[in-house]
Amino acid sequence: MRKIIARIMLTLAMLAVVTLAQDSATFHVKSVHKETPDEHGRDKGSLFSYLKMIGTFNGKTYTVEAMDAGWTKSLEVGKDYPATLKKGAIVTESTYKGKMEKIRWTILTVEE
């Protein structure tokens, strides 16, 4: 009976470690580029400017973009940020003016 309980506890502990490992994924920022409206492919001539960022997430290199705003400028090259992969986007977490912000970055390309 003790062996069964020990196996169950070991299994639960291993599941907890796997779950925590999945939750702790980070996006490592390699570069950030501010696009001019003319550089932005889909919205040429738009009033909005965009930030294009290249980074790694879960072993793949992503090129992502988001609208240029104060909170998107809080991400720094060379740093890691907690992130999750959503449908067609990566959502990063960063601090802007002392407040936690979630930023949705549209995925442009993914490289293995």
Image (cartoon, rainbow, N blue to C red):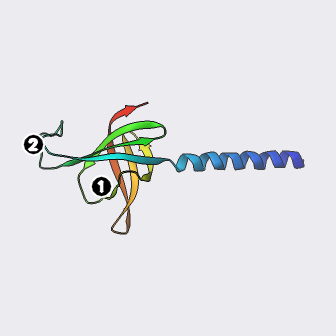
Secondary structure beneath label 2: loop
Residue 76, image x, y percentages: 35, 55
Among all residues in the image, which is located at the extreme right? 1
Q: Quadrant of residue 69?
A: bottom left
The residue under label 1 is 72
Q: Residue at x 89, y 49 (%)?
A: 2
Secondary structure beneath label 1: helix
Query: Is residue 96 shown left or right of residue 7?
Result: left
- Near mark 2 (Cα within 10 A), the count class, few <14, some 14-19 or many ≥20, is few
The residue under label 2 is 45
What amino acid is found at the position of numbered circle 2 in the picture? Gly
Mark closest to the chain's N terminus, 2 or 1: 2
Q: Is residue 59 above or below residue 98?
A: above
Q: Is residue 88 visible?
A: no
Q: Is residue 92 visible?
A: yes
What amino acid is found at the position of numbered circle 1 in the picture? Thr
- Which one is in front, 58 or 5? 58
